[in-house]
Amino acid sequence: MRKLVLGLAGVAAAAAVLTGGVLAKDEDRGRGVSADRCVARPLDQTKIIDEKTLYIDDRSGRAVLLHMSGACLHDRHEAIGLEFSGGMSRICDPLDVDVTGSVMTMPSRCIIASVEALTPAQAKSYRQMR
């Protein structure tokens, strides 16, 4: 009986280690950002970088890139829609905001894959892009 209990404990410990490794890898991919690097309303700028990437900064100087799972931002010069989820006022995680591309012509719902925080130097280069 003792061997069985130790065997089950060993399996449980191995499962915990493997699960922890998977969670760490998910965090390394940067699905979201820490609370001190979130952007919050009032937002200052939004800019379509390409069909799958949206730049957002706020008036406090913080900036993020929203990486979409597919191409949904088709026209760089057309308005996009942002709808904050559940009364949220900041963007830290892919589920914090809904993005709709091309709201004036053919609206397309975007699925956010990850949120990437930018350094002030990176944000400055994106702000200066045309």
Image (cartoon, grey):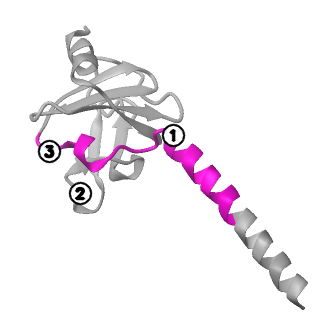
Q: Residue at x 26, y 28 (%)?
A: 79
**Residue 63 in the image: x percent, y percent?**
24, 31
Q: Give the structural element (helix, strand or loop) at label 3.
A: loop
**Residue 17 in the image: x percent, y percent?**
67, 59
Q: Give the structural element (helix, strand or loop) at label 1.
A: helix
Q: What amino acid is at disc 1?
A: Asp
Q: Residue at x 35, y 43 (%)?
A: 33
Packing grade of label 1 (10 A; few <14, some 14-19, many >=20) is few
Q: Of label 2 and label 1, which has the lower sequence position?
A: 1
The magenta region covers: 16-42
Q: Which residue is mark 2?
A: 88
Look at the image and tell me whether residue 108 can be seen: no
**Residue 110 in the image: x percent, y percent?**
44, 39
Packing grade of label 3 (10 A; few <14, some 14-19, many >=20) is some
Q: Of label 2 and label 3, which has the lower sequence position?
A: 3
Residue 16 sits above or below residue 126 on the image: below
